[in-house]
Amino acid sequence: MKENIKLLIELQKIDSAILKKKTIINTMPSKILAVDQSFKEVQSLYDKQKQKYELLEKKKRDKEKEVEDINERIKKIKARTSEIKTNKEYQAHLKEIETIEKERYAMEDEILVTMEEIDSTSKALKAEEIKIKAEKDKAEAFKKEVEKEIAEAEKELNDLKVKRVEIVKPVDAEIYNDYMTLLEACKGLAVTEVKDEICQGCNMNIPPQIFVEIKKNEEIIQCPQCRRILYWKEKNE
Ligand SMILES: [Zn+2]
């Protein structure tokens, strides 16, 4: 195999490795985002539950205040008992107390119902709190893991770049420039194998006369369709 072809194959190998590593690094932040998003959803459910709980507590306090007000009113009405002169007035007086007491009973029933709701909401809230804590721990652990992976991948990428400098050194400048242009145009794959007379870059059938030339691995030959540099891999290579 001619040296140029060999060098280009090596170059493509390292560039593919670099591209793969970069792709891995680029997908990492979205992994963290996904975890953050799912945690936010759990948090938002919890916040809604908490809001409901607080509203119920407020409702209970308001009702209790109303009961206090009613009790105050009853006390005042009862205080007037001594001023009553006629039986008719007395009947009206009793009726008034009865009406207000009915109001109070209804209010107290509402308080009981609200207390039951508070109880069940509080239980749900506690369960949600445990869940949220577990989710948070899970998210933190995952983030740490991903950050570690990013650091490792970046170190590996750096090592690859250092190695690439050495691989590039013996490559002819003109060939290197053509290679770089192709690499850009062909989305990271400028040099590819021909397998069963098919370009592995674009799947085109290579005409027999070109294939014969490629099999020699002497000249730099490009695919008639995708322009990628083609080579032939010997079975024992
Ligand atoms: Zn092709």
Image: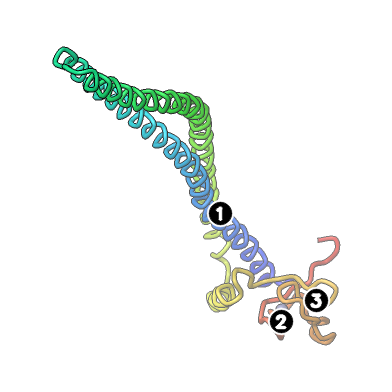
Mark 2: few, some, or many residues within 10 Å (few <14, many ≥20)? many
Q: Nearer the viewer, residue 92 or 147?
A: 92
Give the mark, 1 or 3, whose residue is nearer the N terminus. Answer: 1
| SS label for mark 3 | strand
Is residue 56 placed above or below 161 in the rendered structure? above
Indicate which disc, 3 or 2, sits on the residue closer to the N terminus. 3
Gap in angstroms between the C-alphas marked 1 and 2: 28 Å
Say what amino acid the circle numbered 1 marks.
Leu
Residue 125 drawn at (x, y percent): 47, 29
Residue sitting nearer the eye, 124 or 43: 124
| Relative horizontal placement of residue 30, taking residue 96 as reference (left or right) | right
Q: Is residue 228 left or right of residue 19?
A: right
Q: How is the image coloured?
A: rainbow
Give the residue drawn at x 81%, y 81%: 205
Q: Are marks 1 and 3 in contact (CB under 8 Å)?
A: no
Kind of residue indicated by mark 2: Cys
Judging by the rendered image, the residue that carries numbered circle 2 is 223
Q: Quadrant of residue 170?
A: bottom right
Q: Look at the numbered disc 2 and give the secondary structure of its residue.
A: loop
Residue drawn at (67%, 66%) of the image? 9
Q: Quadrant of residue 183?
A: bottom right
Name the residue furthest left: 83
Vertical position of residue 4 compared to residue 61: above or below: below
Mark 1 highlights which residue?
160
Can you identify the residue that label 3 sits on? 198
Q: Label 3, label 2: how many angstroms apart (C-alpha)?
A: 10 Å
CA neighbours of label 1 inside 10 A, class few (<14), some (14 to 19), many (20+):
some
Q: Amino acid at mark 3?
A: Ile
Q: Please, is residue 28 above or below residue 167 in the view? A: above
